[in-house]
Image (cartoon, rainbow, N blue to C red):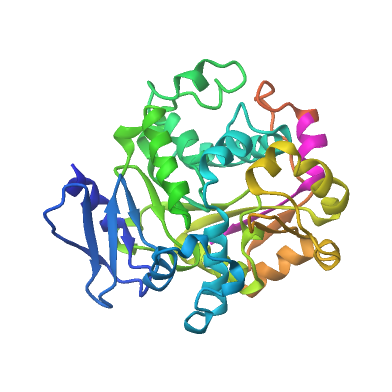
Amino acid sequence: MVLADLQKNSLIINCSTCGSELEIKLTTSIKEQTIRCGNCNSNYSFKNGYLNLLPPVIRKEICKKGMLTRKIKDHFHIENLTKNEHDLIKGIIASKNMAKQYFKNVVHPMEASWSARAYERYEDLMITNYLDSLLDDKKVTFVDAGSGPGRYLILLGSKMIQDSCKDLKKNPETAKLYQFDKKYANNLQYVVGIDYSEEMISYSTKLLKKYGLGQLLNKKIFPVVGVAQNFHFNPRLLVDTHKVVVCTFQTLGNQENVDLQVEMLKSMKNLATPHGTLIISVFNKKLFKDFGLQKFYGREVRRTVGEIINTKDDIENAVLRTSKGVYSKWFSKKDLDSLLLKSGISKFKIMDESNIEPISGFEEYLDIDEQKNQVFPRAIIAIAEI
């Protein structure tokens, strides 16, 4: 079973170091298999139902004995790392011991904090509304850059299998959105979740099984430990699909410097090429002081990401930092416009509360007034066609 899953997984995803095709290196273990790049000799692993594609230089640092307990001031052997690699490692360590609470307090469609849940519900509606139109006549590959504990993997999986996510299909608030849809089962070819936290990917794999989606695991749904900035598909196998690549709920702002933000957008563009769509959703910095620091990072969210430890400069630059090392940069339309242009993305539309469109038909999930009052003032959304 592991080998069969591995063959499918390794076929569609290429080496994170050089972008070349991967090959299976057969071992005697039935629980773990090694994936090798024949071009640069990088090795990766497949175990517990997911592929770990972290670049070796990063994996080496976070796997060293005691590394996860060392202080950031120790610089993680920074003399051997680039600034971007150092910042990525800080982000990986910041997410340690967070997956279960993050799903419950921030992501769960029914239990999460309302400040997070309302925003995410609009993103759910926006993305499924877009996919509905594509899946009528196109094969689609969906990619979540920063998938965390598998929010979209569960949502889209529920629409591909009738007898799944039973509690969500029965609940009057979520039933319509999570219902089975034949065109998703037929035309949504792959759903790929990328996250640099192995803990998040491991937990999302467990949740997929818990929600009755195990039969899709590594056949149509692929949770992958990896760095979105260094992620590559095998273009031969996805040439006939329209790629929808999303980076939502402030994931772009969790990249700790502008270079990482630009590189993430460049990678998303490459993943969507030759034909695809990018959807990016970030938080509006004009609400950072009055809403972000006061309400959004309320008790449930702080319990998950840690207490806020901002400096005066952070507040002026609309940057949030927490005691667990979580970083969050909030944006203006002009900021996002600049990042997209630096990334070589030219055909895009950026929306804020002045022109975001409400979505009707799902009033039990998020009614029009909730969209306008709870979401639109703090959302900036970009859609780009590739």
- Seen at 32% across and 64% down, the residue is 14
Residue 126 sits above or below residue 92 on the image: above
Residue 155 sits above or below residue 145 on the image: above
User: In the image, which residues are magenta?
Assistant: 370-386
Is residue 141 visible in the rendered image? The answer is no
Is residue 8 visible in the rendered image? The answer is yes
Identity of the residue furthest to the right in this view: 290
**Residue 312 image offset from top left, x and y in percent:** 86, 65
Task: Judge by depth and name the residue closer to the eye, 265 or 86.
Answer: 86
Question: Left of 63 or right of it: where is 309?
Answer: right
Question: Left of 68 or right of it: where is 215?
Answer: left
**Residue 172 image offset from top left, x and y in percent:** 60, 15
- Seen at 72% across and 70% down, the residue is 338
Asked if the magenta segment contains residue 163, the reply would be: no
Residue 8 sits above or below residue 213 on the image: below
Q: Which quadrant does the N terminus fall into?
A: top left
Task: Judge by depth and name the residue closer to the eye, 239 or 44.
Answer: 44
**Residue 304 image offset from top left, x and y in percent:** 63, 43
